Amino acid sequence: MRIKMDKKPFLLAAAALALTATLTVGSAMAYFTTHATAKGAVPLNIGFTETEIEEDVDSAGKHIVIKNIGDYDCFVRVKAFSVIDVKYESSGGWKDGGDGYWYYEAVLSAGGSTEELLVTFEYPKNTEEDKTEEFNIIVVQECTPVVFDADGNAVPDWKNGISSDDTQ
Amino acid sequence: MNKKSFPLKSVLLLSAAALLLLGSTIGSARAALTYYSENYSAQVNMSSIGVTLLENGREISSRNYANNGTWVATEGNLLENMLDKGSKLTPGKKYNEALSVKNSGNIDTFVRVIITKSWQNKEGQKATELSPELIELNLTGNGWEQASAPSSPERMVLYYSNVVAPGETTPELSDTIRIDNKIAQMVTKNVSQDGKTIQYVYDYDGYTFNLDAEVNAVQTNNAKDAIKSAWGVDVNVDATGISLQ
């Protein structure tokens, strides 16, 4: 008698093997793993500050003090315009930038004031009339936010300077 | 005759298959018992995996296996101490942000860290107009290898190439974080009506930057398969550790 090969048992065996195979994969996947997460956020509160100029005029000249009345640190510089020659005298902290401006060297922190910068002038000597003539010395002050360069040094950013002038 | 005896064969095969199935189930059930049974824990040092994320040496988040299938997890916040009290984030300034990973379990592990950076606008929505590249987390190398494929400006995946032994802390993967001061140049100019005062307003004032970190740890036994299974990446494993393929 010819033995007939029946497919059924093989199919069953194959199914059984496949089932056992999936079970093996199941337990092999039980590796030891763990994880931990953390989040953090920091708001970027950047803004421009406001500065105020305080000027006292006496016989010596114009005494200039810049006050930072805003919430952010800044750098400041001033320039005086006049029809007559003016000179600057610093009691410390101010430096001639060589570009017409005098720069306050330190960072002016929020709420702080600069040292005094004295702008002196001389009356023209040629005629008596000139003495009685009135003239203006216009002081322009600029402030700019403090930014940090790649090395982490605080530097002014004069491209975004805020200027205001005051005439007396 | 033949036809009648056939069902017996198939029944035999079926029961054999059932037995095999049963056998394999018992097998894995046994494996589970070895890991979690209390009886065993009294006799052998139970394997437990654990990982802790550190920021500037401070433990932030962790997840450690305790026993009986329970985990002890903590989750803290990053960047909490970045700014001194009362001070504001200054664009361009570098702040300390040293991230490292500690093995807080008792088996050797391989670890990786996924860093995600993004911006949020004032309304708390994700700000896609600002590039995550403006958030510069300075990577140190130090044995940390950055995967090129799943990394993007927003998401970085860093693999530590050496085995981290129990109690050991990896070298720091980063040292500082900095917001590019380009952001300080994105301004709108306003001139007062009398023309005497010029003011600028920052376009991105009030935006928030986010830094998320996820640490993954995996066993070192059978590392290649374990890492493929847990992290979905192919790595080369040698005596010193792992390297990305």
Image: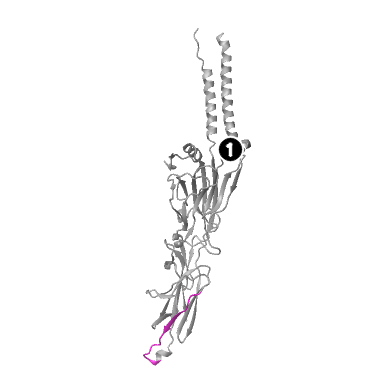
In-front residue for pair A151/A156 = A151
Residue type at tag 1 = Val
Q: Residue furthest top?
A: A1
Q: Main secondary structure of the magenta part?
A: loop
Badge 1 density bin: few <14, some 14–19, many ≥20, Cα 10 Å: few
- For the point 38% across and 88% down, the residue is A124
Please provide percent x and percent y for residue A30. Answer: 54, 36
Please provide percent x and percent y for residue B91. Answer: 47, 61
- For the point 40% across and 91% down, the residue is A129
Chain that bears disc 1: B
Q: Which residue is mark 1?
A: B44
- For the point 55% across and 33% down, the residue is A27
- For the point 49% across and 58% down, the residue is B96
The residues colored magenta run A113-128
Please provide percent x and percent y for residue A76. Answer: 45, 72
Residue A159 vertical position relative to residue B180 in the rendered view, above or below: below
Residue A4 vertical position relative to residue B88 in the rendered view, above or below: above
In the rendered image, the quadrant that contains the C terminus of chain B is: top left
Check if residue B230 falls in the magenta segment: no
Q: Residue furthest bottom?
A: A128
Residue A148 vertical position relative to residue A94 in the rendered view, above or below: above
Check if residue A120 falls in the magenta segment: yes
